Image (cartoon, grey):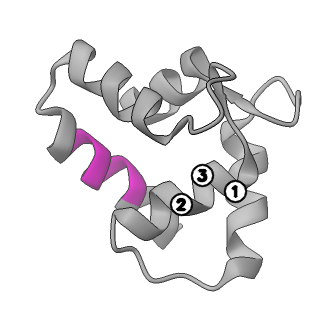
Amino acid sequence: QHLHTEVKSRVLQLARNDPALLKKIFNDFDLNGSDSLTIDEMTNLITKLRISVERKFIYPFFKIVDANNSGAIEYEEFEGYILS
């Protein structure tokens, strides 16, 4: 629960309620240019946000954000999660 709250809060602070900035944040962490975030890219985002969390909690978090269970987080899922 802590991880969910922190990720949403810190991404929203960075985006300053600007949808274009939210998309830029997503794209900045999409290192392979696949238009989706892998588990490693999401782990990198959490690290860059300076959220201290054990690695074992990242996968369950990832599965929640990956609403369509594709194995990656598309922008629509990311945006929907952050803004929910």
**Position above or below: 65 against 21:** below
**Circle 2/circle 1 CB separation < 8 Å:** yes
Callout 3, which amino acid? Met
Q: Residues within 10 Å of mark 1 (few under 14, many from 20)?
A: some
Residue at 53% from the left image edge and 29% from the top image edge:
78
Q: Disc 1 versus disc 3: distance between alpha carbons?
A: 5 Å
Q: Residues within 10 Å of mark 2 (few under 14, many from 20)?
A: some
Residue with the mark numbered 2: 44
Label 3 sits on a secondary structure element that is helix
Q: Disc 2 versus disc 1: distance between alpha carbons?
A: 6 Å
**Circle 1/circle 3 CB separation < 8 Å:** yes
Residue at 87% from the left image edge and 36% from the top image edge:
71
Task: Tell me the magenta residue range.
Answer: 7-12
**Position above or below: 39 against 50:** above
Callout 1, which amino acid? Asp
Pick the quarter of the image with the C terminus. Answer: top left
Residue with the mark numbered 1: 40
Give x and y (percent) for residue 8. 37, 48
Residue at 66% from the left image edge and 34% from the top image edge:
32
Residue at 73% from the left image edge and 43% from the top image edge:
38
Q: Magenta region's main secondary structure?
A: helix
The tag on residue 42 is 3
Give x and y (percent) for residue 9. 27, 52
Asked if the stretch drawn in magenta spans residue 9, the answer is yes
Label 1 sits on a secondary structure element that is helix
Callout 2, which amino acid? Asn
Give x and y (percent) for residue 29. 48, 41
